[in-house]
Image (cartoon, coloured by chain):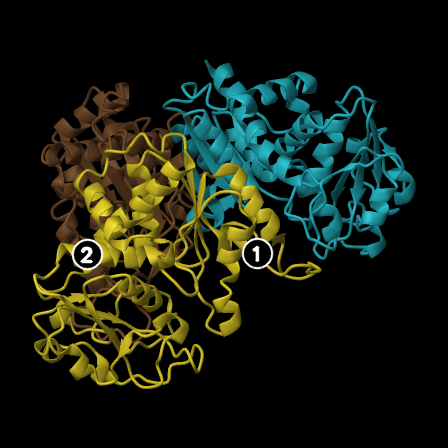
Chain colours: A brown, B cyan, C yellow
Amino acid sequence: MNFTSVQNIDSLQEWVKQALKIKKNPLKNKKLGKNKTLGMLFFNPSLRTRLSTQKAALNLGMNVMVMNFTNEGWTLEFEDGAIMNSGASEHIKEAAAVISQYCDIIAIRAFAGLKDKEKDNAETVLAGFIKYASVPIVNMEGCTGHPLQSLADAITMEEHKTEHKPKVVLTWAPHPRALPQAVPNSFVEMMQKQENMDFVITHPEGYELNPEITKDSKIEYDQDKAFENADFIYAKNWSNYTDYGKITNSDPNWTVSADKMKLTNNAKFMHCLPVRRNMIVTDEVIDSENSIVIEQANNRTYSAQLVLQKILKDAK
Amino acid sequence: MNFTSVQNIDSLQEWVKQALKIKKNPLKNKKLGKNKTLGMLFFNPSLRTRLSTQKAALNLGMNVMVMNFTNEGWTLEFEDGAIMNSGASEHIKEAAAVISQYCDIIAIRAFAGLKDKEKDNAETVLAGFIKYASVPIVNMEGCTGHPLQSLADAITMEEHKTEHKPKVVLTWAPHPRALPQAVPNSFVEMMQKQENMDFVITHPEGYELNPEITKDSKIEYDQDKAFENADFIYAKNWSNYTDYGKITNSDPNWTVSADKMKLTNNAKFMHCLPVRRNMIVTDEVIDSENSIVIEQANNRTYSAQLVLQKILKDAK
Amino acid sequence: MNFTSVQNIDSLQEWVKQALKIKKNPLKNKKLGKNKTLGMLFFNPSLRTRLSTQKAALNLGMNVMVMNFTNEGWTLEFEDGAIMNSGASEHIKEAAAVISQYCDIIAIRAFAGLKDKEKDNAETVLAGFIKYASVPIVNMEGCTGHPLQSLADAITMEEHKTEHKPKVVLTWAPHPRALPQAVPNSFVEMMQKQENMDFVITHPEGYELNPEITKDSKIEYDQDKAFENADFIYAKNWSNYTDYGKITNSDPNWTVSADKMKLTNNAKFMHCLPVRRNMIVTDEVIDSENSIVIEQANNRTYSAQLVLQKILKDAK
């Protein structure tokens, strides 16, 4: 069993319930991971994912080996049939097979390069490990998805659920650097699995996410309109998907401000973090009582723990 | 309970006694830290602190997550109200609050930049974590203090205590690079808590440490005179505090040599390490039987263990 | 007891037997390493060694502290009597003695620089730790040897032993970068300890390894002739030892191809990894059923575990 996409969640409602059960008693399954080893491979920086996934594994009694691939290991080759006479020292075929000898589960972070859409969509690193590893693979944010984050988001929304059918808005917001679409992609996929929520995506025209992911999710180009009566505002920047990896808009009017939040139904403010203050969201909003970003980060431990637990149980 | 300064030591004599008790039986409290997690965050290189603090946590049965913030995580913003449109990806507000979700204690190393005295004195990083974290903070060397080192120094001096009231000398010595004042600052503060020792600071004129720290500690500009009848010589370089962060003196006559040591009462030689041989101290002195620098390093484990143990007990 | 060279293996046959016993039940000695700490110090990149040695220590119940010396610690000085007024911040004398205070075993990786033959042959880093540490040292690949790899190779060959006396061939193969001789050196030394194997080294003329290591091992400059009737082909590049550290040959005819393998007695293909595909060996060969490179990597855990186990038992 791999966990590489929101699509691997067979029942979101069930998983959220199970994660909340883990949260109540995180050490209950401390024996499950005994003598099992999680290998965490980072091709990119990480704070929340690094620490929460490690914490989740420790809660399950697992051993953890963390490796920053970019400076601690060898440069990898991913192309089949490559004549390896230049930069790369090791082929993914060997790397994945070898690491599988030492780890019971391999977790991988490998961001989109944002230069080659096709290559990013192919999830070269993640797909290489899936293909050549002989143990389960966990996605700690790939090029096109960040399912551990979205699962944590679902857990957090469940904890703050409204009595009425909530309206959830994913809003684009400006950012000085070109960012991947991984987080919004997985959030959209996760929302599509929600059974009793209204979901709206809002972003400037031209900033459409991959239509194969958004499918028939509602898109509203007028942010103010989208915010009306919203119960959850999920802010996130992403770079242009059509004009791939480019920043074609940096309009500060899209920043989530207190005025914008006034349009909502006293909505909770969400973000996956790290967040650029006063770009994505004003201090006033993120520092308000309605901000649940730290709770989201906290739930990263339980989303990771649920996934690891399922994999460990599945392997028995 | 935080441990960020020598001023947090309520009774130095009592703490030293407790640390020596731990040293005799380091695994006695192996259950105290069970299922507790220490997060160690490094903004600067570290050898002794990295390994000894980790070892201390392991002796207490804790889990340890080590993170090199500069290359593994995100660049932090520390300014309130900043519009985060340039280098920094994450605000200390979120970072500290988030890490607090995964760790029971956070230990931080963040050296002085030595360019902006006011900023260094504000201990931006450490103070940011103290302000925004929700768990205890341990200082693994900040801009202006290194209390774990000074506690280890006190332990080491206790192990080598003389029958008479000892004379302890902190001497400046030359070094090719500009170094922070953290170690000498904390040593001075620690010595001010000693009840039955004579203490003298010796350094070239103009190399005065922060007078708010040295207070009425005795300063003697004549190194030879300071060394007379000394029982402990603690050597350390620091850069100029007045002409902030500058090297205004590199006089090799301040190097601790065998001839200088002859002026003392067969004094023990101490240094926090790493030490530049034949700059700070000659080979002859540091390789002599009177050198107790390795014992100091060894006691780093027990000073860290005492601090972690106190925090863990305090949290119960 | 140190483990720094194949020469530390008193009986190869006995060690291989013991390692295979460990492989059958890797957790049998989980209590042996309880409260013991392995310090792993890396001066160079590592994948297999990093993870397999860590895994071996975990199998023995040890604590592990991993440190990338080059960016996490201080630059070391190795020369006796040096006036440390330039790059290096800490002398090996202190570093080794200090780390010995926190670790029960120190494992070190420090590659050859390939610029100064005499310095590389002196194994500056490894020898420094051996001299100044007070705990056992394990070689995780030095300048001139990689004994944990060769022990794993011997284990792997034992698992694939032929009924007849096998012929083992170490063949040089081309590579775009200058590589150390550590792996072939240790392989040669290990083969010299094999009691019932024929051993041939093949490489272009001028690519002789250190004659003090090869001694009277057979050298055959005609690769085709060497491959005849071979049961094991061990491929490895190394840079020129005479014209030290230079690449004086990059002849693709030395690449191990399917045609070359046809000359053998259906030989197993071996390599220590990482391997440059279609430089050292063609895809066809390394992807064939006769390739046992992943098994070699797997046995790294058991060679490391045997060594750690012997050291731990020796220390009792």
> What is the crowding at mark 2: few (fewer than 14 residues within 10 Å), some, or many (at least 20)?
many
Horizontal placement of A2 versus B267: left or right? left
Query: Callout 1: residue from which chain?
Result: C
What residue is at 51 percent from the left and 57 percent from the top? Answer: C127
Q: In which quarter of the image is the N terminus of chain C?
A: top left
Q: In this view, does B117 lie above or below C278?
A: above
Three-letter code for the amino acid on which mark 2 is drawn: Thr
Q: Gap between marks 2 and 1, in whole Å? A: 37 Å
Quarter assignment of residue C195: bottom left
What residue is at 59 percent from the left and 26 percent from the top? Answer: B3
Q: Are marks 2 and 1 on the same chain?
A: yes
Q: In which quarter of the image is the C terminus of chain C?
A: top left
- Provide the residue designation for mark 2: C156
Give the image location of residue C45, x and y in percent.
39, 58
Give the image location of residue C32, x and y in percent.
33, 32
> Foreground residue, A58 or C37?
C37
Horizontal placement of B192 versus C186: left or right? right
Give the image location of residue A232, x and y in percent.
28, 32
Quarter assignment of residue A178: bottom left
Judge whether residue B26 can be spotted in this image.
yes
Three-letter code for the amino acid on which mark 1 is drawn: Thr
